[in-house]
Structure formats: structure tokens, C-alpha cells
Image: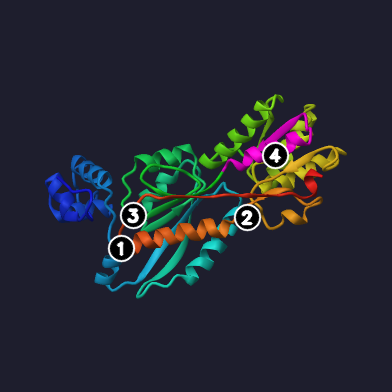
Amino acid sequence: MINNNKKIRLKDIADAVGCSVSTVSIVLNGKYKERSISEQVVTQILNTAKKYGYMPNMSARYMRSGQYNMNISLMTSFEAPLVLINAWLISIEKFIEQVSVENMSFTITLTPFHVGHLEKVFSVKDIEAAIIANTNATDDEFLEEASLSMPIVLINRRISDYCTVRLDESAAIEAADVLISQHRKKIAVLKPPFLTQSTKERFDNFTHRVIESGLPRPDVIELEQYNEYGAHLALQAYFKTGGTFDGLFTMTDVLAVGAYKAIKSTGRKIPDDVAVIGFDGLSYAPYLDPPLTTFEVKRGFVYSEAVRILVQMIMNDFRQHVEITYKTKLVKRGSIG
């Protein structure tokens, strides 16, 4: 029986499964196909490692090998807006430059995947440590079921047995309250073509709040492309079918850019005819016409905290599952009057 209160070694897993330490090492390093290890043994080793929270001692591994550079994979879907990915990369790079660990340096690699196909990355790449964002339900199911033995921190999703840094999505309730308090009677929401765990929570919070107030369910205007152009096209099509609203919540600031153009093209004025609220606090929000009301997100804190946790996992060989949640702040500007 493995004592779950101590640091787990390869020998502990080998003893529990009834195989050699070298077999365990081969399996956990993903080399079992080349060595023709049976599926039954592979499954037993992976399940045992996951059950007892085994995490490879990365620092010891590098000290033995004489290699001192750790590659951190930043995983995000191709479909996520580029401006969000860019903000993520800049924040993490700045933090990594400040990380000081004796005899070890860090390299950042952007590892994109198509939404719903995260598992393909792990099947073709040798991942040492990862920060993962912008996954959908299929990707989350893969993470839930997979026996991944490398250090991993998730952004904006809760999955058992993983550390996570996330935003408080209850901010969407405040967005609904602002529009309701302005006596906007017909409210709509611009919805991306796929929802992550966090954006689904944001969408549900906003929608439920509007309904609770006694107003009709918000019109959901769904995009085919997750960018400014997609938002513009979706709203154009909505208006052509006779759709109308006087309050709009865009799930990200990116979508507000396309929404502005589509709204103005119909002769409507912001905020006189339509109040608009975004989310993400992107740098260009104050420079739209009128300046966009949005939720300020301290992305630098979110991303640097994810890296801090990941580095701690790498150096200290711990498997403590932590969840850190950051609040957002509504910044009111001209788009709501």
C-alpha cells in the first residue's frame, strides 16, 4: 500500500503494480509503444500514478542530466482571438524574465491546438510542463480522464486534480445589472462559436440575471468566426432579419469592435440607442468611439501566478491542487452613457 502522505517514487508505483522501475519509467515517459509493453500494464501504471498524484522530480532529472533549461509549453486553441493570445504571451514572458532559479533557465514555447483536439498535442509532442487555456468541453474531458504526469496549470477552468488560476465570472451579473438599471428593455448577447468552461459560466450568469429581472430572455447572436469580422457579420445578419436591441453584452472586447461598426451602419447611436458592455479590458477599449465600458482583467496577475505555481511544481515536486480566483473590475465609459 502506498502512503499518500509522502513523496511518491517510481519504486512505489512499481511495487504497487508488480513490475520493474524501468518499466514504470518507460510508461510515464510515453515510450511504451516502442518497447511493446502490454496495454494492461500501461493502464495499471498510469492509473496508479494518477491515483497517488505522482509528479516527476524535474529538478533532480535536470541535475542528473546536466541540462538546466526547462521548456514550458503554453497551450491555447488556434480559434482563440490573437489579441488575447498576444496579451497572454507578453505577460508570461515578462514574468519568466524575473524568475530566478539557481542552475535552471526557462524557455517558453507556444503550442497551439484546434479546439476539441487537445489530446493530439500530447500524442505527438514530448511535453515537460504546460499552462493550458482556451479549451472546450471535449478538451476538458480529455484532461479529466488522462493520466498526465507532467506539471500542468490551467487557466480559467476547474478540473479535478489540476491547479488552476481563473477569473471570477460573476462579473457578468454586474454587466446585466448595469443594463437593467438603465432601463434597457431588449437585451442581446454576442456569443462566440464555441464556449470554454469560463465563457459558458459568463454567458449563463448574464442570461440568468436578465431573466430573473423579469425581462425577456436575451437574444443570442452567435458568431461563425471568433473575431471582429465575425461579430460584424453576425450582427449584420441579425439586423437584416428584423432583430433589434437596446443593450448588448459582448463576451469579449474583441467582439465589441465588430459590433460597433454593425450597429452604426444601421444609423443607431451608442449609447443613445444601444448601450454596449464588453469583457477583458483590452488595451484598445478606451480608444473606441465611444470608449468601451468593460471589465478590467489583471491578466498579468493571472498569467504570472500560473507560471509561479508551475515553477513551484517543477522545483519542489509537489502535487498540491490549488485554485486561485481573481476578481474583475467594471470600468464605466461612454458606451453606456
Q: Which tag is nearer the camera, tag 4 or tag 3?
A: 4
Location of residue 55 (image quadrant): bottom left
Mark closest to the chain's N terminus, 1 or 2: 1
Protein image colouring? rainbow
Q: Is residue 182 magenta?
A: yes
- Are the residues at dot 4 and dot 3 in contact (C-beta closer than 8 Å)? no
Give x and y (percent) for residue 205. Answer: 60, 35
Q: Name the residue beneath numbered marker 4.
A: 249
- Are the residues at dot 2 and dot 3 in contact (C-beta closer than 8 Å)? no
C-alpha span from label 1 to label 3: 9 Å
- Under circle 2, the secondary element is helix
**Taking the image as drawn, is residue 93 in sight?**
yes
Amino acid of disc 4: Phe
Judge the density around disc 2: few (<14), some (14-19), many (≥20) Cα neighbours within 10 Å.
some
Q: Name the residue beneath numbered marker 2.
A: 83
| Residue at horizontal 11 percent and vertical 46 percent from the top | 18
Where, quadrant-wise, is the N terminus in this rendering? top left
- Under circle 4, the secondary element is strand
Give x and y (percent) for residue 50. Answer: 28, 45
Where, quadrant-wise, is the C terminus in this rendering? top right
- The reply, left or right, for residue 270 in relation to residue 317 is right
* Label disc, if present, on residue 58 of the rendered structure: 1
C-alpha span from label 2 to label 3: 28 Å
Q: Name the residue beneath numbered marker 3.
A: 150
Nearest the viewer among 335 and 252 is 335
Amino acid of disc 1: Met
Amino acid of disc 3: Met
Nearest the viewer among 35 and 296 is 296
C-alpha span from label 1 to label 2: 33 Å
As drawn, 77 above or below 242: below
